[in-house]
Each structure stands twice: as structure tokens, then as C-alpha cells.
Image (cartoon, grey):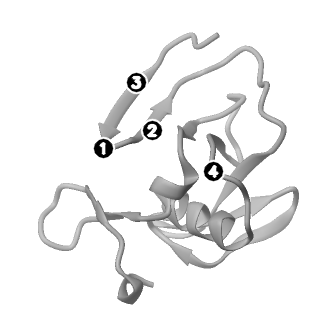
Amino acid sequence: MNVETKSALCGKVQISSGATTADSAPAIVVIHPASRGKFTATLGGSPLVARPCSSVIFAACRALVAAGVPDGAKRFRHAHSAHAYDAEVLSIHVGARLIASDESSSAMRIRKWRYEDE
């Protein structure tokens, strides 16, 4: 049902973005802007990522794993988006082990998450 799909593959995590006409996922993580380049996330109106961060999708995956959510795909939507969803992580357990980082260059890179990254 994707009208347009652009995807980037990193290991076993596929992040897809595109417009959809219908949404079959029961619960979508909503991403909210917090400050310049920082975001928070909610699930069903409850905070999922307490501290704003730039890598909110992967931080939300870590929070879902910590809450005991079974592995599987999870959809993410920006709070003011007109689309049914903006991104989809196919495995929250794999997403929990990643972080988006731009510390060494101007390009954003996806790398393995370390505890000290939080």
C-alpha cells in the first residue's frame, strides 16, 4: 500500500519512509520535536523516551525491549505528519542495538549502540 517507498538497509534493520493509504499496525510510536535536532517519543500517549535525543527511533526500540515488548516490526510517525506512518523498523531488538551518530563527520552514520551513548 505504499505510494512511495525509500529505504535504507543497515544490517537487518530496514527503515522505510513513505506515504500510505491505510495503517494495519495496532500501535504506532509518535515522535515529537523537543528542541533543535532532539526528539521524544510516545506510545499510546505515554512517554516512551524520557530524555530528548537525536536518535529517537533507536532509543524507542531500546525502551520497547526494556518494557518486554516481543520482537517484531514497529511503525513510527512524526506528530505533525499527514502520513499513516513515516518509518518502520522491522526488528525492535536489532534496532535497540543501534544508534544514529554524526560525531566524526558531517554525514549521519548508523553504528552499534554502547551504554555510554545514553
Q: CA distance from mark 4 to mark 3?
A: 23 Å
Comparing labels 2 and 3, the label whose residue is closer to the camera: 2
Within 10 Å of the Cα at label 4, are there few (<14), some (14-19), or many (20+) other Cα atoms? some
Disc ID at residue 86: none
Q: Are marks 1 and 2 in contact (CB under 8 Å)?
A: yes
- Numbered disc 3: secondary structure: strand
Disc ID at residue 6: 3
Q: Are marks 4 and 1 in contact (CB under 8 Å)?
A: no
1 or 2: tag closer to the N-terminus:
1
Disc ID at residue 15: 2
Quarter of the image with the C terminus is: bottom left
Within 10 Å of the Cα at label 2, are there few (<14), some (14-19), or many (20+) other Cα atoms? some
Q: Residue at x 79, y 25 (%)?
A: 24
Pick whichever, 64 or 107, lies toward us: 64
Residue 39 position, x and y percent, is 57, 66
Pick whichever, 32 or 17, lies toward us: 17
- Numbered disc 2: secondary structure: strand
Is residue 40 left or right of 113 when viewed as pictured? right
Residue 48 position, x and y percent, is 72, 69
The residue sitting at the left extreme is: 105
4 or 2: tag closer to the N-terminus:
2
Q: CA distance from mark 1 to mark 2?
A: 8 Å
In the rendered image, which residue does mark 1 sit on? 10
Q: CA distance from mark 2 to mark 3?
A: 8 Å
Q: Residue at x 87, y 56 (%)?
A: 44
Q: CA distance from mark 4 to mark 1?
A: 17 Å
- Callout 3 amino acid: Lys
Residue 57 position, x and y percent, is 53, 57
- Callout 1 amino acid: Cys
- Numbered disc 4: secondary structure: loop
Q: Residue at x 68, y 28 (%)?
A: 83
